[in-house]
Amino acid sequence: MPFRLVFTESYLRIAVRFLRPHPDLKRQYGKTLALLEANPHHPSLRLHALAGKHDGVHSVSINLSYRITLEFLIRDQAITLVNVGSHDEVYSR
């Protein structure tokens, strides 16, 4: 069963601000979202739980430099996207 991606208004604003200066990542970002929806446990996403102030949030990789943080609710088959940006940007918010 595929997962359902939930795009909040705040996430969409963050994504637009992220993609504007990174048009070269649009294709890879789209592929990451498609794979996340189809199989969030795919090894290339490198899904992992975060700790500390980000407890309860997970992260997936777009590439080695950029991440998407998300709330991963298995029981509801829903994945709520929280943030997208460089490693330092998503882990400092």
Image (tube, grey):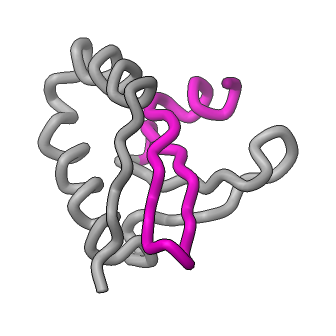
Picture coordinates of residue 8 (x, y %)? 41, 35
Q: Which quarter of the rendered picture does the C terminus lie within?
A: top right
Picture coordinates of residue 47 (x, y %)? 53, 65
Q: Residue furthest bottom?
A: 1
Q: Give the side of residue 93 with respect to residue 90, left or right.
A: right
* Quarter-of-image position of residue 16: top left
Along the line of sight, the residue nearer the viewer: 80 or 60: 80
Q: Give the side of residue 68 with respect to residue 44, left or right.
A: right
Q: Which quarter of the rendered picture does the N terminus lie within?
A: bottom left
Along the line of sight, the residue nearer the viewer: 36 or 78: 78
* Quarter-of-image position of residue 23: top left
**Which residue: 25% across, 13% down?**
21
Q: Which residues are magenta?
A: 64-93
Magenta residue check for 91: yes
Does residue 26 lie above or below 71 as drawn?
above
Picture coordinates of residue 64 (x, y %)? 43, 46
Q: Tell me how many marks there are.
A: 0
Does residue 48 lie above or below 54 as drawn?
below
